[in-house]
Amino acid sequence: MSTCAICLDTLKSPVALPCGHVYCHTCISEAIKATAGPSSPITCCPTCREPVSIVTPNPLLVPSHLRPYILPPFRRLYLNAPPLDPSSSSSSSSTSADEVERITARLHMENAILRQSCHAWRARANAHVAAHVGLSTLARLAQDQARILRDERDELARKYDALKRKLSDVDR
């Protein structure tokens, strides 16, 4: 069975950080409280020091098609490996070890796939932000240009009225 890198004991209610490191839920919660404090929105993984956001966005502010991709700061893992029984024969314990190794390899593969997916979504989000910024800049420029044209129109209308009055005064 896997062990927690913080308490060095068998994992109890394991959770995985986005970087892929797995800890006991209570151990990582206590480590976050001890290092970052409850008011800090960002902390680091105890193993690789990769920044981990511990703030979950409000799902009501996220578009409905993106809500399934919002995860809490860490994700619960359920390892379905059978517990190792010391009284069992050596062949069954090697089978259990092989099964644990296979599950661990599968978790690493799933983690790599999730990272690729996150990178793809991050790239899409960055493209969306760039497009949004470009469009809002264009809208602001259009509004400024419309204001300039409106001011020119008003100025020309004033000059036209002034010339009309001069012409009517000259005709009299």
Image: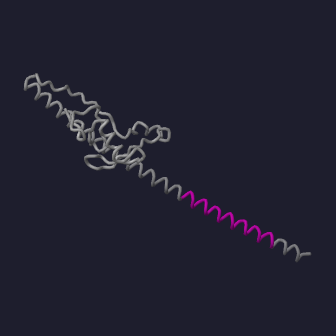
**Is residue 160 covered in magenta?**
yes
Q: In the image, what residue occupies the spot 75% across and 67% down?
A: 157
Q: How many discs mark residues in the rendered view?
A: 0
Which of the 4 image quarters holds residue 154?
bottom right
Image: magenta residue range? 138-162
Compared with residue 172, is residue 38 higher up or lower down, i.e. above or below? above
The N terminus sits in image quarter: top left
* Along the line of sight, the residue nearer the viewer: 8 or 158: 8
Res 56 quadrant in image: top left
From the viewer's perspective, is 79 left or right of 168? left
Q: Residue at x 42, y 46 (%)?
A: 39
The colour scheme used to paint the residues is one colour
Q: Is residue 31 magenta?
A: no
Q: Position of residue 96 (x, y in %)?
A: 14, 28
Q: Taking 137 as reference, is 100 above or below it?
A: above
| Residue with the most extreme left position | 90
Q: Position of residue 115 (x, y in %)?
A: 30, 44
Residue at far right of view: 172
In the figure, 153 relative to 65: above or below? Answer: below
Q: Is residue 84 left or right of residue 123?
A: left
Q: Quadrant of the C terminus?
A: bottom right
Which residue appears at 34% of the width and 46% of the height?
Answer: 52
The image position of residue 156, as x and y in percent, is: 73, 69
Where residue 20 sits in the image (x, y, percent)?
27, 42
Magenta: main secondary structure equals: helix
In the foreground, 13 or 146: 13
Q: Residue furthest front?
A: 34
